Image: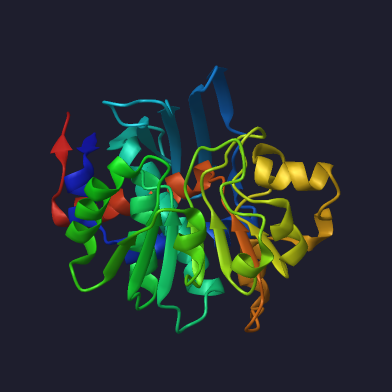
């Protein structure tokens, strides 16, 4: 049984590898060659325990993760992924679930940029400078030649450390701008990424600032959480979700459906979009909402395990 921490994972794979794995997971999702129950959520006020099992033809995996959004001196997320053999059920690996969650979620956003953003996209905005925001920025820079990153966080004192961490990943050639408001952050951005745990929309109800852009929502994973304003649904030419579960799990999809701001038939999974080989025309307003799913974790962690074994990475616990 292998234990893989953050450093082991980064030795085994790159962000591009993980984005490729996300695309592979979409293929599995569309083929329906997997078993994945709706994730179990146990809540105590804002504290959440998530249990996410999944079985594919290649591997079995279960992720346990806690989310404590008000943590000040500890990470918001703690977690562990258990990877089992599909052949005999034995535990093959224990993998840092906190890092996997951030890294593969970044890759989900990276996949959206790969397939939905303009090829010449160079400016992005990140709303929410936590761990999720960091890996969204890294993934964006992996998929496009980004020149400018605009940042906004409701607690501005956290932004400098975020910039330091981001520069360790992407270097110092990309201009990083800390902005005083969301409006300032998104004005020049071609892609807007929200990565917050807000219960109220963090983007302004201003169509001029949202039109003809790719909007990626990462933070809302419960029906009471929202990052998108009502006007965005009136603007949207395309709305994509990573999993059908997002229809009920995320307030950014469930609320507009309940209020008839959008119709169910206007929402498409990324898996069906990629299978159809459709193309997004220029000048369109495109929305992508991710809530994540255990299938991503299994496909990604199985890749990491295979690469780690090839490279002799990790700590053997048996």
Across and down, in percent, residue 122 comes to 40, 77
Q: Residue at x 77, y 62 (%)?
A: 234
* Residue 9 at least partly seen: yes
Quadrant in which residue 70 is drawn:
top left
Q: Residue at x 67, y 78 (%)?
A: 278
| Residue furthest to the top | 44
Q: Quadrant of the N terminus?
A: top left
Quadrant in which residue 151 is drawn:
bottom left
Q: Nearer the viewer, residue 167 or 53?
A: 167
* Residue 17 at least partly seen: no
Q: Eyeballing the image, is 31 above or below 246? A: below
On screen, residue 308 versus residue 47, left or right, reads left
On screen, residue 124 versus residue 169, left or right, reads right
Q: Eyeballing the image, is 208 above or below 278? A: above
Q: Residue at x 38, y 57 (%)?
A: 179
On screen, residue 160 versus residue 71, left or right, reads left
Across and down, in percent, residue 229 comes to 67, 51
On screen, residue 51 versus residue 177, left or right, reads right
Across and down, in percent, residue 170 comes to 23, 65
Q: Nearer the viewer, residue 188 or 171?
A: 188
Q: Quadrant of the C terminus?
A: top left
Q: Eyeballing the image, is 197 above or below 30? A: above
Q: Residue at x 31, y 26 (%)?
A: 72
Q: Nearer the viewer, residue 18 or 174?
A: 174
Across and down, in percent, residue 164 comes to 19, 53
Q: How many marks?
A: 0
């Amino acid at each position: 049984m292998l234990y893989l921490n953050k450093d082991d994972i980064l030795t085994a794979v790159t962000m591009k590898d993980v984005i490729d794995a996300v695309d592979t997971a979409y293929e599995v999702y569309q083929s329906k060659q997997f078993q994945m129950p709706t994730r179990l959520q146990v809540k105590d006020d804002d504290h959440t325990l998530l249990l996410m099992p999944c079985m594919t033809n290649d591997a079995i995996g279960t992720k346990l993760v806690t989310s404590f959004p008000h943590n000040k001196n500890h990470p918001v997320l703690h977690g562990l992924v258990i990877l089992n053999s599909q052949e005999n059920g034995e535990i093959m690996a224990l993998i840092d679930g906190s890092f996997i969650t951030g890294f593969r979620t970044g890759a989900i956003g990276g996949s959206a940029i790969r397939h939905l953003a303009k090829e010449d996209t160079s400016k992005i905005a990140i709303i929410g400078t936590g761990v999720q925001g960091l890996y969204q920025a890294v993934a964006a820079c992996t998929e496009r030649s980004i020149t400018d990153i605009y940042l906004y966080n409701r607690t501005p004192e956290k932004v400098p450390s975020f910039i330091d961490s981001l520069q360790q990943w992407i270097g110092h050639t990309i201009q990083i701008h800390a902005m005083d408001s969301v409006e300032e952050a998104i004005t020049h951005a071609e892609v807007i990424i929200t990565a917050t745990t807000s219960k109220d929309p963090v983007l302004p109800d201003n169509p001029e600032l949202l039109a003809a852009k790719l909007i990626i929502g990462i933070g809302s994973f419960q029906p009471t959480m929202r990052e998108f304003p009502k006007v965005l649904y009136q603007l949207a030419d395309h709305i994509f979700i990573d999993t059908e579960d997002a229809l009920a799990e995320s307030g950014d999809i469930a609320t507009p459906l309940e209020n008839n701001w959008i119709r169910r038939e206007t929402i498409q999974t990324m898996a069906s979009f990629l299978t159809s080989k459709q193309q997004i025309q220029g000048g369109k307003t495109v929305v992508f909402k991710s809530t994540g799913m255990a299938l991503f974790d299994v496909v990604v962690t199985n890749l990491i395990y295979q690469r780690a074994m090839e490279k002799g990475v990790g700590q053997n616990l048996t």
